[in-house]
Amino acid sequence: MSDIQLVHTDKAPAAVGPYSQASAVNGTLYVSGQLGIIPAEGKLAEGFQAQTRQALENIKTILEEAGSSLNKVLAVDVFIMDMSRFAELNAIYAEYFPEHKPARAAVQVAALPLGGLVEFKCVAVID
């Protein structure tokens, strides 16, 4: 087994607990759950749509730091506070994955860290 590499970038929010933004091994990147935190401010974006876009931007930034991209994502897990916002989520998500459609699961949760409204995590390939 290859060595595990931990990924960190100041362009994405710091972890809110004892974990890394992402870890990589054997050409696969595992990106930790990302909330809609604005990195420069350290606080959540205002509202569901803004948090959704910011969380996806955070994912994109971490992927790029690790040498990957949205086009190399294999699977995405979505945690959403209110499933009635699912259509809004899908519309924004489609902006980030217009042609490449990774496997995905979406579940409604009772709560997210820091009072977030949506969180994404993913697995991607690294060249």
Image (cartoon, helix red, strand yellow):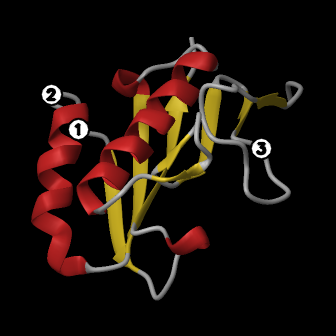
Tell me the number on the disc at residue 20.
3
Residue linked to disc 2: 99
Q: Which residue is drawn at 73% across and 49% down?
A: 15
- Quadrant in the rendering for residue 23: top right
- What kind of residue is marked 1? Lys
View extreme (front): residue: 41
The secondary structure type at the circle numbered 1 is: loop
Left or right of 86: which side holds 62? right
Residue 48: percent from the left, percent from the top? 28, 62
Give the mark nearer the N terminus: 3 vs 1.
3
Q: Depth check: 39 or 122 in front?
A: 39
Image: 3 above or below 21: above
Q: How crowded is mark 2: few (under 14 residues within 10 Å), some or many (20 or more)?
A: few
Asked if labels 1 and 2 touch by Cβ distance under 8 angstroms, the answer is yes
Alpha carbons under labels 3 and 1: distance apart: 26 Å
3 or 1: mark nearer the eye: 3
Q: Is residue 80 visible?
A: yes
In terms of sequence position, does the residue under pointer 2 or pointer 3 come before the other? 3
Q: In which quarter of the image is residue 24?
A: top right
The residue tagged with tag 2: helix, strand or loop?
loop
What separation in Å lies between label 2 and label 3 (alpha carbons)?
29 Å
